[in-house]
Image (cartoon, rainbow, N blue to C red):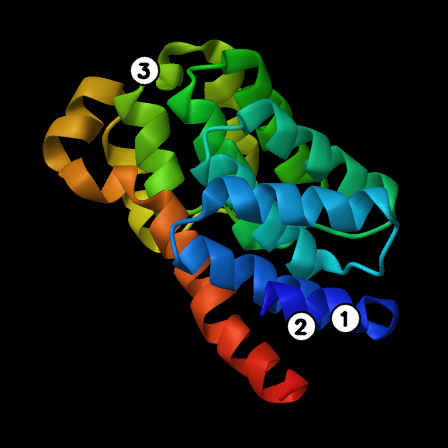
Amino acid sequence: AVNVYLGVVEKADAHIHTVITNGLIQAGQYHRAAVFFRSATHKTYPLDSLAYAVGIHAHLRGGRTLEANTLFDQMKDNGLEPNVQTFNMMLFSWFKVKDLQMVKQLLKEMIDSRTVLSDRNFFNLCNKNFFKDRCCWNLLAEMRDLGLLSTKVLHAFSHDRHAKRVKANYKHGNEVDTEYNLVLDSSSSEHMSDVAVSVC
């Protein structure tokens, strides 16, 4: 598929870049997918929000959090609005490296763009002890007031004021560690099927 792509690259649109990058990810070739996507950005080929989401996914799967964040910023600089899945995917990546400042920055951006926080990322806030930070607590309160938290999260937020009790009463164990899979199952698998149909 990559070789075919190279032969038609001058006519390639965002969907083709997205399908090929996603195909490499599905094959477990995260490094190759990341290199392929970066090449597309360097050559200023046309890329849309979904293409960037999949490119960011490739970098995160390959453990390239900083490069993924650079793409995230580039995406916004190009006037493309990250969707709810992309925001939550990036937030999850900062949880993994325990970067409190970036977590707070992303939460602020999600508030500004009125983006819903995923349930799993809420419980990551609790389980990773970010909940103890007053600024994080205030940002979550603002998200609650703006309707950016689900009913399940609101129940935890209202009845369990301390991270330890939230963690004890809302067992998400393995679930909180699967944000990549769930976010990209929705933004990749289903959408990729639609994209593939439109390309074929």
Up/down of 155 relative to 196, above or below = above
**Helix, strand or loop at disc 1?**
helix
Residue 129's label in the rendered image is 3
Q: Is residue 98 visible?
A: yes
Residue 121 lies, in percent from the top left, at: 39, 38
Name the residue rendered at 71%, 42% in the picture.
38
Rounded to the nearest whole Å, what is the CA distance between mark 2 and mark 3? 48 Å
Residue 109 versus residue 46: which sits nearer the camera? Answer: 46
Picture quadrant where residue 70 is located: top right
Residue 4's label in the rendered image is 2
Up/down of 88 relative to 16, above or below = above
Q: Is residue 115 visible?
A: no
Q: Are marks 2 and 3 in contact (CB under 8 Å)?
A: no
Q: Are marks 1 and 2 in contact (CB under 8 Å)?
A: yes
Mark 2: which amino acid? Val
Read off the residue under disc 1: 7
Quadrant where the C terminus sits is bottom right
Residue 172 lies, in percent from the top left, at: 18, 40
Picture quadrant where residue 163 is located: top left
Quadrant where the N terminus sits is bottom right
